[in-house]
Image (cartoon, rainbow, N blue to C red):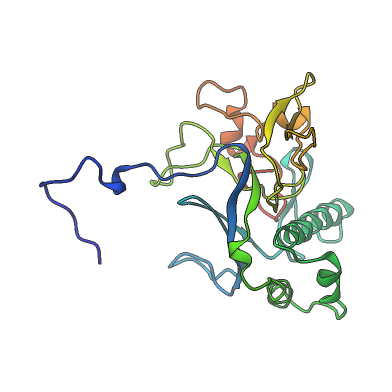
């Protein structure tokens, strides 16, 4: 158990005084590792209702970036255009939103697996028999991870949070949005095996973003002008951004996992 410190001596070269190194917005090349991709029957905080998920953790230097793939099941609230709440599972709008959400999630899982060397044929092969539950699905995909997957150097693209997160008090908004893991595949590839070469950012005349190495090759990480102009491609500063409405419930982007989320 940690103890509270009192006054005394601390060296000005103490390593604990330094900021932890981490990733920045955009491409981070050859510096990331997928250190966790595992099913957990309960990821809820103490006192909250049990919640199963695939836990994901990527490390860049000393900093961790985490995400959770939560079950999407019929009956859960979905959101349509203009953040319209959808609850009727027989409604075509609900079915469309549900299918888009679960499709994005399955594509996201495939993306993580392929980044550490799992082939699409291997992924398809574990679904020869129908999936009977989220736990069944999660355990099948997690079983595909190769030994030593957590040591494979990866290229990582971080985007900005869709809206302002909250400080530890759970009420006060952060003063800006910060780089975070993408929640879906809408922006494009964001995690792949480290590509050879030194990659240089290139902003095109239309505002799109790409990366090029000394041989003139383009990296798979590309973002179009619409992405770069939106919340994911532009850091928002509280009180200064035109997108500060995203900090309020009515300004949230439509969710893809059955409930309003911080990113779209």
Task: Tell me, yes or no, if residue 56 can be seen here.
Answer: no
For the point 69% across and 43% down, the residue is: 264
Which residue, as the protein is rendered here, is positioned at the far front? Answer: 215
Q: Quadrant of the N terminus?
A: bottom left
For the point 10% across and 47% down, the residue is: 8
Residue 121: give x, y in percent of width and height. 86, 69
- Quadrant for residue 229, please give it: top right
Of residue 193 and residue 138, the one placed in the foreground of this image is 193
Q: Is residue 202 above or below residue 254?
A: above
Of residue 192 and residue 138, the one placed in the foreground of this image is 192
For the point 69% across and 41% down, the residue is: 197
Q: Is residue 197 above or below residue 154?
A: above
Q: Is residue 72 above or below residue 42?
A: above
Residue 42: give x, y in percent of width and height. 55, 72
- Quadrant for residue 111, please give it: bottom right
Task: Tell me, yes or no, if residue 75 can be seen here.
Answer: yes
In this image, 231 relative to 219: left or right?
left
Residue 241: give x, y in percent of width and height. 57, 23
Of residue 141 and residue 77, the one placed in the foreground of this image is 141
């Amino acid at each position: 158990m940690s103890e509270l410190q009192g006054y005394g001596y601390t060296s000005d070269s103490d390593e604990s005084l330094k900021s932890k190194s981490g990733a920045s917005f955009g491409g981070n090349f050859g510096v990331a590792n997928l250190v966790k991709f595992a099913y957990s029957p309960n990821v809820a905080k103490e006192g909250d209702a049990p919640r199963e998920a695939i836990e994901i953790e990527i490390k860049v230097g000393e900093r961790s970036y985490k995400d959770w793939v939560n079950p999407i099941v019929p009956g859960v609230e979905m959101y349509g255009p203009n953040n319209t709440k959808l609850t009727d599972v027989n409604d075509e709008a609900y079915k469309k939103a549900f299918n888009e959400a679960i499709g994005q999630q399955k594509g996201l899982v495939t993306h993580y697996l392929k980044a550490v060397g799992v082939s699409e044929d291997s992924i398809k092969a574990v679904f020869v028999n129908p999936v009977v539950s989220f736990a069944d699905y999660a355990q099948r995909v997690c079983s595909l991870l190769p030994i030593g997957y957590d040591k494979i150097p990866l290229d990582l693209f971080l985007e900005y949070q869709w809206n302002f997160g909250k400080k530890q008090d759970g009420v006060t908004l952060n003063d800006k949005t910060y780089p975070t893991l993408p929640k879906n595949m809408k922006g494009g590839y964001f995690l792949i095996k480290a590509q050879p070469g030194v990659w240089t950012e290139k902003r095109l005349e239309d505002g799109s973003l790409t990366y090029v190495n000394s041989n003139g090759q383009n990296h798979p990480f590309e973002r179009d002008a619409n992405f770069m102009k939106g919340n994911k491609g532009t850091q928002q500063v509280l009180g200064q951004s035109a997108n500060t409405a995203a900090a309020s419930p009515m300004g949230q982007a439509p969710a893809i996992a059955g409930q309003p989320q911080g990113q779209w």
